[in-house]
């Protein structure tokens, strides 16, 4: 049986046209598969410019790859029939970073919840529609009587984002792509939203792709983790293993930037060469991280490192691990675990 959604050797290049001759490679030969069962949460982590949002937009069909294919049920998204595309729109939902991108400020929040019910024919009559919406709101920790009948500006940022989670839940999708869903809400509300997303996974059997630049929330919610750097996979595997035993120099750099909850402890210092700004374009050859890596070798400048399997549930694209067996990119799913973790 084919995966629910598969990304196969996908690259995305921007520019190169008459008015924008320069090109920017947002994603390079990226592959991953999202199985329908068991449902898991995969965190995709990286700094700004690493290709996270580009990946998210292609997963839900908002953008098409320059090279490679995005498959739904084994069929290229560009070849889906109208009936298959409708099924795809129902089964794969997205939660955006800024809920204001979805809300119409002139309509009450009821509108954004009623629309998917009507579009996909989920209820018969107003009373059944109301029951579905109220059930979805309660599932994400909102009281219908305090949410419905209000305009977007009358809700807090956390409430608006949870309405978006409820909207995705309404259609009972098989996959939710959440693009930085907690980056625009207060820290006090992040745990609530993350718990709502985790409950969708545990209680409703929905797989989640959680896009973030924040390793802390990725650790809280993710079963698996994929670390992206300039559109390439730096490291991938079980979240706990990557956090406790990071192997790629870039993953170590990301972890060193997380402050410790002790005022007497200072952040780990990293070599100046490793903290330079992420430029708009990566290297034409060799490792994308070579210019910033304190451990770079001559081979890093010339040869693109493949994925090396360093454990049952961990792989790293780094020449430092050349003595380990190679893992073809299309087999990345082999190191991603399906083990469920308790809600933090």
Image: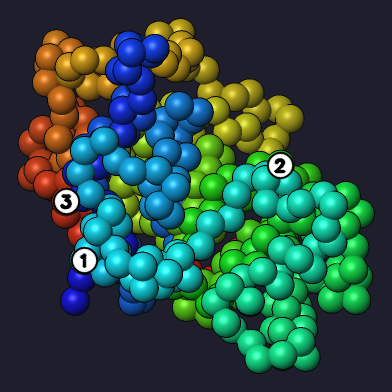
Between the C-alphas of marks 3 and 1, the distance is 14 Å
The picture places residue 286, in percent across and down from the top left corner, at: 18, 19
Which residue has dot 2 on it? 184
Asked if disc 1 and disc 2 are in contact, CB closer than 8 Å, the reply is no
Disc 2 is placed on an element classified as loop
Between the C-alphas of marks 1 and 2, the distance is 35 Å
Numbered marks: total: 3
Q: Nearer the viewer, residue 213 or 326?
A: 213
Which residue has dot 3 on it? 330
Residue at image position (47%, 40%) is: 53
Q: Quadrant of residue 231?
A: top left
Is residue 84 depicted above or below 130 in this figure?
above
Q: Residue furthest top?
A: 272
> Is residue 3 found left or right of 152 in the rendered image?
left
Residues packed near mark 1 inside 10 Å, few (<14), some (14 to 19) or many (20 plus)? few
> Is residue 55 found left or right of 47 in the rendered image?
left
Residue at image position (80%, 62%) is: 109
Which residue has dot 1 on it? 74
Disc 3 is placed on an element classified as helix
Between the C-alphas of marks 3 and 2, the distance is 34 Å
Residue at image position (29%, 41%) is: 65
The picture places residue 19, in percent across and down from the top left corner, at: 39, 12
Residue at image position (29%, 63%) is: 80
């Amino acid at each position: 049986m084919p995966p629910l959604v598969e990304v196969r050797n996908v690259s995305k290049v921007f520019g190169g046209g008459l008015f924008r001759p320069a090109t920017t490679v947002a994603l390079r030969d990226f592959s991953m598969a999202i199985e329908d069962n068991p449902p898991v949460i995969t965190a995709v982590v990286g700094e700004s410019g690493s290709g996270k949002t580009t990946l998210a937009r292609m997963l839900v069909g908002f953008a098409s790859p320059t090279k490679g294919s995005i498959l739904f049920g084994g069929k290229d998204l560009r070849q889906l029939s109208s009936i298959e595309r409708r099924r795809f729109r129902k089964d794969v939902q997205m939660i955006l970073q800024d809920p204001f991108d979805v809300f119409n400020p002139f309509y009450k929040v009821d509108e954004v919840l009623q629309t998917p019910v009507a579009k996909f024919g989920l209820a018969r009559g107003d009373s059944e529609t109301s029951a579905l919406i109220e059930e979805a709101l309660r599932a994400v920790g909102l009281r219908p009587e305090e949410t419905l009948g209000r305009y977007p500006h009358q809700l807090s940022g956390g409430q608006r984002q949870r309405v978006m989670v409820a909207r995705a839940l309404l259609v009972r999708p098989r996959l939710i792509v959440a693009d930085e869903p907690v980056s625009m809400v207060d820290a006090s509300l992040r745990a609530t939203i993350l718990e709502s997303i985790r409950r969708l996974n545990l209680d409703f059997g929905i797989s989640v792709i959680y896009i973030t630049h924040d390793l802390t929330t990725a650790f809280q919610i993710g079963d698996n983790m994929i670390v992206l750097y300039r559109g390439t996979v730096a490291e991938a595997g079980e979240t706990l293993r990557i956090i406790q035993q990071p192997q790629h120099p870039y993953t170590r750099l990301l972890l060193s930037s997380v402050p410790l909850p002790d005022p007497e402890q200072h952040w780990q210092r990293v070599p100046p060469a490793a903290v330079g700004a992420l430029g708009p374009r990566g290297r034409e050859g060799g490792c994308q991280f070579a210019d910033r890596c304190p451990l770079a070798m001559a081979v890093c400048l010339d040869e693109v490192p493949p994925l090396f399997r360093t454990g049952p549930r961990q792989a790293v694209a780094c020449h430092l691990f050349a003595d380990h067996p190679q893992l073809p990119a299309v087999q990345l799913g082999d190191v991603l675990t399906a083990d469920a973790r308790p809600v933090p």
